[in-house]
Image (cartoon, rainbow, N blue to C red):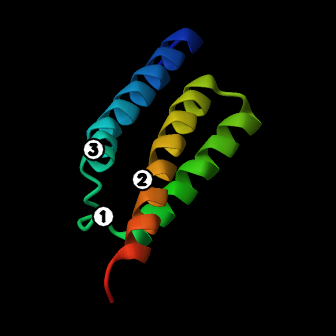
Amino acid sequence: MNLQAHEIEIIGYCAAFLTTVAFLPQAFHSWRNRNLSGVSLGMYSLFTAGVGLWLIYGLIIEKWPLILANAITFALALSILLLKLRHTSKEPK
């Protein structure tokens, strides 16, 4: 495949947009309902750490699609993770 640099960049921005927007319904649902019983603490911990590392990687290689998408997704994932931690500590044992 012989793509120009700007075409590759457009693919990156499209992928970043779609994967970030796909995450919004879960974030809004979690914020609105505060019901995180279906959210796995282990999975969200690993996911948030992974997105944080993707963000760092994007910063190192200076690729804006990676930086923008992962900065937004990291903030959303971290907010859900913090909600999960707060509500898990309040659940009766």
Q: Residue furthest right?
A: 60
Q: Which residue is mark 3?
A: 32
Q: Secondary structure at mark 2?
A: helix
Quadrant of the snapshot with the N terminus: top left
Q: Secondary structure at mark 1?
A: loop
Of marks 3 and 2, the one in the foreground: 3
- Left or right side of 55 for 62: right
Q: Which residue is mark 1?
A: 39
Quote the CA–CA distance across marks 3 and 1. Answer: 14 Å
Q: Which residue is mark 2?
A: 80
Q: Secondary structure at mark 3?
A: helix
- Left or right side of 62 for 30: left
Contact? badges 2 and 1 (CB < 8 Å): yes
Mark nearer the N terminus (2 vs 1): 1
Q: Is residue 80 above or below residue 60?
A: below
* Residue type, numbered disc 2: Ile
Residue 1 in sight: no
Quadrant of the snapshot with the C terminus: bottom left
Mark nearer the N terminus (3 vs 2): 3
